[in-house]
Amino acid sequence: MTDTDNAAGMSDRLADLREHKGLAMDGPDPRATERQHDKGKLTARERIDLLLDKGSFTEVEPLRRHRATGFGLEDRRPYTDGVVTGWGTVEGRTVFVYAHDFRIFGGALGEAHAEKIHKIMDLALAAGAPLVSLNDGAGARIQEGVSALAGYGGIFRRNTRSSGVIPQISVMLGPCAGGAAYSPALTDFVFAVRDIAQMFVTGPDVVAAVTGERVSHNGLGGAEVHGMRSGVAHFVYDDEETCLDEVRHLLSLLPSNNRELPPAVPVEEPEERRDDTLLELVPAQGSRSYDIRGVIEAIVDGGDFMEVHAGWAANLVCALGRLGGEVVGIVANQPAVLAGVLDNDASEKGARFVQFCDAFSIPLVTLVDVPGFLPGVDQEHQGIIRRGAKLLYAYCNATVPRISVVLRKAYGGAYIVMDSRSIGADLALAWPTNEIAVMGAEAAASVIFRREIAAAERPDELRRSRIEEYRAALAHPYHAAERGLVDDVIDPRDTRSVLIRSLAMLRGKDAEPARRKHGNPPQ
């Protein structure tokens, strides 16, 4: 064979390769792309292009096809088998991704489809890089039977193995039904787009058949439902472009794996910056409400932070931001909602966030203004003891740098749970408006002096006197500091600078976790 013949042969092979790759890129039916766009949805590859840095995507197994037979499957063997997998970069850092292609088998998972996902999950874990799943699939491929179910089992096992090792992010961009819904639930963060994302274990038809209840797909498991009621979705957005841009922003705040620190950035503003608005933002009177997000904005770099679960359990704010260029996790009671009490949902929300930050070396700053746990029969019957203990366990178990700041009220068991000095906070600070006590002075006086007040000729006058007596003895701003339970009482305007210096001091913290296989947290 001459060199000319060899070149011609290679040219033919390359032309054949381009044809096959073209089929993999375009999909088997141009009309399927039109139908996807008609639903207001992007294709899998369009989504990947928005997520990753331009031109950085490297695809894995684009020519994979299923080998199933029966029910006509042997005549339908499109390339990719309905899922696009690979890796690329976000702001120059490696990120692995897989995206269901609804144009092919409705994005349903079969054996080959699952094996592609397994491979990319294994690569992400081996490389120590985040994994993002773009979900838009109809669940298990019924025609492949139990093989499809086994494929889901392999995904769940890998989700669990990667938990706390690499960040895992699920983006809901279409239906996710049945067992498929459990994979996003096992990941660290779930994003959802209104009107097009749905998640449920049993669909509306099954619900109607079993219970007689009629409900729409969005009413059962739409983005709003999971963002505001179930707590399954951490972030909800109106369109795919904004959603994927926010995924990029979240990745910029996270380390690639649990062996690295979160990425730091240069700071343009001085750490000594003081903010006089804090003096007016937080009322000295404990009964008056305010929005804690204004405090967070005044403290963090550039006033920029990313709130997690903003629509669910809003009486507790969890957010990621930066102080002095370093990423921190912020947990704060929200007096503007339910007076900032802790309840079942807020406890679970906070516990999950604290555990995530601890797993990925993100220091914790806790802003405390809590009147207690929410009383009520429903709360007790729904497990406030067990569920409140989740937040307590998460804080006690955390080994990252931990700083708490008491702004105003800090009463009873809720004060202890909100990362008090007694459960391991490295530094406990307070503003001069703090009131740390078993309960509020009014309630305490009513209990301690109940009989005396009842027998008094002027009970209201005596009650006011006893309240001031209790406050002066046990609930004044310096009581906890005098006993070493608060390290310093600080000027609110200095909060930012004190936190930055304290976190810098704690950066090298070395807290060896207990030697055990794992703990047994309350469930």
Image (cartoon, rainbow, N blue to C red):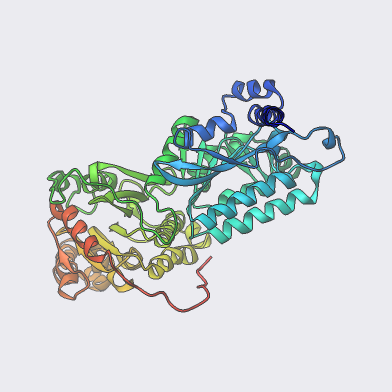
Q: Quadrant of residue 472?
A: bottom left
Does residue 514 sit above or below 279 in this rendering?
Answer: below
* Residue 395 shown left or right of residue 206 in the figure: left
Residue ID at (72%, 45%) = 112
Residue ID at (84%, 37%) = 74
Residue ID at (35%, 68%) = 413
Given residues 237 and 466, the one toward you in this image is 237
Specify the farthest residue to the front. Answer: 2
Residue ID at (71%, 38%) = 81
Given residues 314 and 380, the one toward you in this image is 314
* Residue 155 shown left or right of residue 446 in the figure: right
Residue 438 visible? no
Given residues 313 and 10, the one toward you in this image is 10
Q: In x, y percent, where is residue 210?
A: 75, 45
Q: In x, y percent, where is residue 206?
A: 73, 42
Residue 69 visible? yes
Q: Quadrant of residue 154?
A: bottom right
Total marks in image: 0
Does residue 373 sit above or below 195 in this rendering?
Answer: below
Q: In x, y percent, where is residue 468?
A: 14, 65
